[in-house]
Image (cartoon, rainbow, N blue to C red):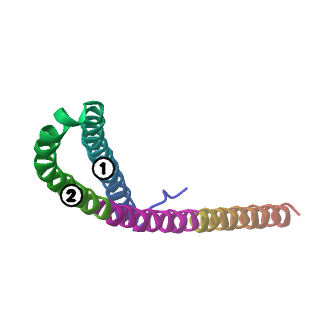
Amino acid sequence: MKRFHWPLQRLLMVTTQREQGLRMEVFALAQECASMRRQLAHRQALLRQALAELATHDLQQRMPRMEVFLKASVGEERQLDALKAALAELDAKKKRKTEDLMKARASRKTLERLRTQALAAHLREQMRLEQKQFDENAHVSFARRMASQRESA
């Protein structure tokens, strides 16, 4: 039986490797997003905790501390806004990579389907050729038997 050779096999391998690479990139971006979200939540929790701590003091002590807190919180708010912007940008990048991954996956599945169809066609052709060879052998052996019967008769 002739060995199956599919001309697009190399393309399928490259597409599969590209899909795996994209999957790893999406995973890394997801981890980075999660890390940024944790950092953002931690900073916000620290601000809430500091504000709650200020609320426990009496008014005389709270006012000067509140002024210092508000001045410091302006800078912290800028950092939080920058972190949120970076997180939004990272989410957008992850979304683009996920779309690329979906396209690569669809391409791979299409190539795999084409390969399966080509393999089935190859097997049918090989079976047809094999059957043709069997038929030819049967005709030849029948012709020899008939010829030998005629010679003996």
Give me the disc on residue 81. Answer: 2
Give the crowd class for mark 1: few <14, some 14-19, many >=20 residues within 10 Å: some
Q: Nearer the viewer, residue 13 or 153?
A: 13
Give me the disc on residue 125. Answer: none
Q: Position of residue 101 (x, y in %)?
A: 38, 61
User: Residue at image x 17%, y 33%?
Assistant: 61
Q: What are the residue bounds of the magenta stretch?
A: 93-119
Give me the disc on residue 33. Answer: 1
* Residue 143 placement, left or right of 58: right
Q: Nearer the viewer, residue 120 or 71?
A: 71
Residue found farthest to the front: 60
Q: Position of residue 100 (x, y in %)?
A: 35, 66
Q: Is residue 13 magenta?
A: no
Q: Nearer the viewer, mark 2 or mark 1?
A: 2
Seen in the picture, residue 54 relative to 24 is either above or below; the reply is above
Q: Nearer the viewer, residue 84 or 17?
A: 84
Q: Is residue 109 magenta?
A: yes
Q: Please, what is the three-letter code of the amino acid marked with disc 1?
A: Cys
Q: Please, what is the three-letter code of the amino acid marked with disc 2?
A: Asp
User: Residue at image x 30%, y 31%?
Assistant: 56
Of the two numbered discs 2 and 1 on the same chain, state the one appearing first in sequence. 1
